Image: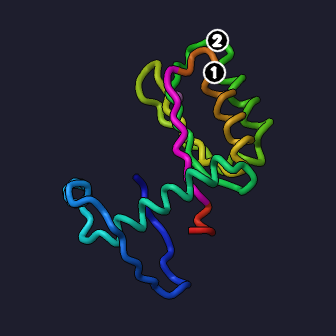
């Protein structure tokens, strides 16, 4: 779960929830482990998570994310292919960070923005390249609807 947001705007609304006692105590233990001070903030974050999931599944709104890649830069042609692919999607790559982890391995983080279909095409293209050992897309939001 990730959380950062602007809480300005609409007035607060209160609502009652009927919930099984055992489920509620499990939830309370869960949010305590996560460091929440109260249920309200935990429930707000759960709702935001579902809304972000929906932004990614509905397909039409602009989304934001980070793509982390681990790869061996000695793999033949890999860096040229990665650069070419990123240039083809230049409108969706906001910035990149590169870390030389050791003699062989590089870590690259791309901050990406665009429609989910476009971001997935870029992600799949990069992750399927020979020499890319691991890739992980963290799907997030522009925050406008949260
Ligand atoms: Ni490197």
Q: Is residue 11 left or right of residue 128?
A: left
Residue 128 point in image, percent of width and height: 63, 21
Residue 3 is inside the magenta segment: no
Residue sitting farthest toward the top: 76
Magenta stretch, overall SS: strand
Q: Of label 2 and label 1, which has the lower sequence position?
A: 2
Q: Is residue 46 left or right of residue 86?
A: left
The residue identified by callout 1 is: 128
- Residue 82 sits above or below residue 8 on the image: above
- Residue 143 sits above or below residue 58 on the image: below
> Bounds of the magenta span?
133-141
Q: Is mark 2 within 8 Å of ligand 1?
A: no
Q: Is residue 18 left or right of residue 26?
A: right
- Which residue is more in the foreground, 18 or 113? 18
- Which residue is more in the foreground, 15 or 83? 15
Q: Which mark is residue 67?
A: none
The residue identified by callout 2 is: 76
Based on the displayed image, in which of its 4 quarters is residue 19 positioned? bottom left
């Amino acid at each position: 779960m990730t959380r950062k947001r602007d809480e300005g705007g609409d007035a607060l609304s209160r609502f009652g929830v009927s919930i099984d006692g055992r489920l509620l105590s499990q939830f309370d233990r869960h949010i305590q482990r996560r460091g929440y001070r109260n249920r309200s903030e935990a429930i707000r974050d759960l709702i935001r998570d579902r809304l972000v999931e929906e932004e990614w599944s509905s397909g039409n709104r602009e989304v934001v994310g980070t793509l982390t890649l681990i790869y061996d830069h000695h793999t033949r042609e890999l860096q040229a292919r990665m650069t070419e692919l990123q240039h083809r999607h230049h409108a969706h790559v906001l910035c990149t960070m590169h870390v030389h982890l050791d003699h062989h391995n590089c870590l690259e983080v791309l901050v990406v923005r665009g429609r989910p279909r476009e971001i997935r095409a870029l992600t799949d293209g990069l992750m399927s390249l020979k020499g890319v050992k691991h890739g992980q897309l963290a799907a997030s939001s522009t925050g406008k609807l949260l």
